[in-house]
Amino acid sequence: MCTGIKYTGVDLEKGEGHERRDCEAEKDQIRAEYRQILKNAVAFEKRIRNRWREKNKQKNERIAELEAKVEELERRLAEG
């Protein structure tokens, strides 16, 4: 349907400029959200790694304690 409004090249450029700004703003918003998601993911993985390291350290300490007990018991048996 024809409205009878005639657009000049300047009017079209203004519309394109506004659309371009909107696209740039949306792109910036998406990039910011992506960076935030990535930052959260890295922090989450770091917490998991730290928790795993602590549990692994505790496990190794317990193994060392048990090995020391076994050595002590073997020594007693040898003396015995």
Image: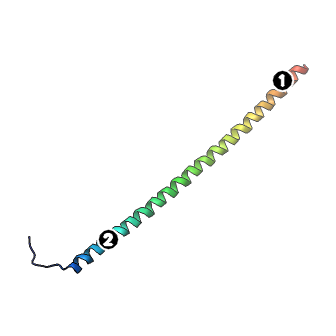
Q: Residue 32 at x, y = what percent?
A: 45, 64
Within 10 angstroms of label 1, few (less than 14), some, or many (20 or more) residues?
few
Q: Residue 18 at x, y = what percent?
A: 30, 74
| Amino acid type, callout 1 | Glu
Q: Are marks 2 and 1 in contact (CB under 8 Å)?
A: no
Q: Is residue 22 above or below residue 70?
A: below
| Amino acid type, callout 2 | Arg
Q: Is residue 75 above or below residue 29?
A: above
Which residue corresponds to the image point at 80% horizontal and 32% vertical from the top-left? 68
Q: Residue 43 at x, y = what percent?
A: 56, 54
Nearer to us in this view, 70 or 40: 40
Nearer to us in this view, 17 or 66: 17
Which residue corresponds to the image point at 37% horizontal and 69% vertical from the top-left? 25
Which residue corresponds to the image point at 18% horizontal and 80% vertical from the top-left? 8
Residue carrying label 2: 20
Quadrant position of residue 61 = top right
Q: Is residue 52 left or right of residue 73?
A: left
Q: Is residue 74 above or below residue 25?
A: above
List the single residue furthest toward the front.
9
Q: Mark 2 or mark 1: which is in front?
A: 2
The label shown at residue 74 is 1
Q: Is residue 41 left or right of residue 72?
A: left
